[in-house]
Amino acid sequence: MNTHPTPSLKAPWKDDFHSHLEKQPEFYLATVTPEGLPRVRACIHRGFWAELPPNEHNKLEKNPPIFETDCPVFTTDSRMSKTYELFATGKGHGTVEQSQSGSGGGGPVEAVYWIKDTMTQWRVRGKCWLVAANDVEGESSHNSGTMTVKAEVGRFMRPVGEHEEKNNDWSWRREVDNHFENLSPTMRGTFKNPPPGKPLAQGADSDDEALGQKAGHLEEEELARKNFRVCIIAPEEVERVDLSDPNKSQRWLWTLSQEAGGPGKNDPSHSKTEGEWNMVETWP
């Protein structure tokens, strides 16, 4: 279990990164298979953990805004190959069955964001944790996967201002429910599709699985709830390349300090400290 303290300051790269993602949320996520092979796929940025993006169509009760993080979020189906890869390459070396059963993961990832409007490329390297609705709270939450996720992600959750003493008002399950609700009904329905990647000739696993369905609230959708995951990237290295001026391209690398649970690799003689992060400017 990680005992590193919660970073006390917002990451120095967060504001610019956030503003760029509002222009273009698409990105590419790389994972590693248990055999050490690379896998890349396109994903959609869904905000930052504990900072749910507003959605006029989402009428569910929200968590109070008492935390902020530097952790990008996306969503996935537990039956996707990346889910197993994140379990199998994490410290727990999880099985396929474990990856489809609940919260956990922790495998290494690299996310690449190309923001054409600003001619900027971002790379975020770190570990990725998955949160399932069914085991994140209540009696079923006392498993090693859920406890590890809450410890590892929880250390990135900074209390905000006067809300610091109201932590008990914040619910992990409520946050997962709202991420599902922020999706369109058709996108929610994809979590009731037949298993991704399974040969068509083998058919679906159950009569409830079919393409083109819509879905309502997560608590009312047993099949979708079983498959839906919120994926949280805990960043350890962030790189920004600015190509907006062809005569003066720039590149920066931020590394989370060892004291805050990061690799802390940068040579201090060529870099500077920015909160819990160490920044070095490099040739582009």
Image: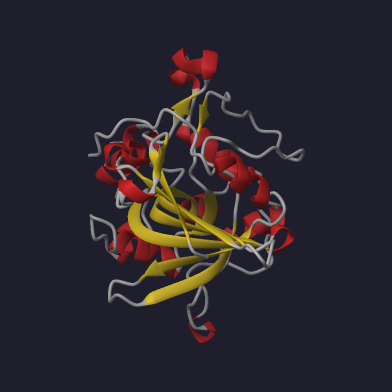
Q: Position of residue 5 (x, y in %)?
A: 31, 30
**Left or right of 1 on screen, residue 130:** right
Residue that sits furthest to the bottom in the current view: 201
Q: Residue at x 46, y 34 (%)?
A: 172
Depth check: give the residue in front, 214 or 173. Answer: 173
**Left or right of 26 on screen, residue 222:** left
Residue 16 lies in what quarter of the image? Answer: top right
Count of all numbered marks drawn on residues in the image: 0
Q: Is residue 217 visible?
A: no
Image quadrant occupied by the N terminus: top left
Residue that sits furthest to the right in the current view: 56
Q: Residue at x 30, y 75 (%)?
A: 36
Depth check: give the residue in front, 159 or 184. Answer: 159
Q: Position of residue 116 (x, y in %)?
A: 70, 63
Q: Is residue 113 visible?
A: yes
Residue 18 lies in what quarter of the image? Answer: top right
**Left or right of 201 on screen, residue 35:** left
Q: Position of residue 22 (x, y in %)?
A: 69, 49
Q: How is the image coloured?
A: secondary structure
Depth check: give the residue in front, 276 or 282. Answer: 282
Depth check: give the residue in front, 254 or 83. Answer: 254
Against 13, residue 117 (above or below) is below
Against 93, residue 201 (above or below) is below
Q: Position of residue 274 (x, y in %)?
A: 44, 37
Q: Residue at x 54, y 54 (%)?
A: 75
**Left or right of 170 on screen, residue 102:** left
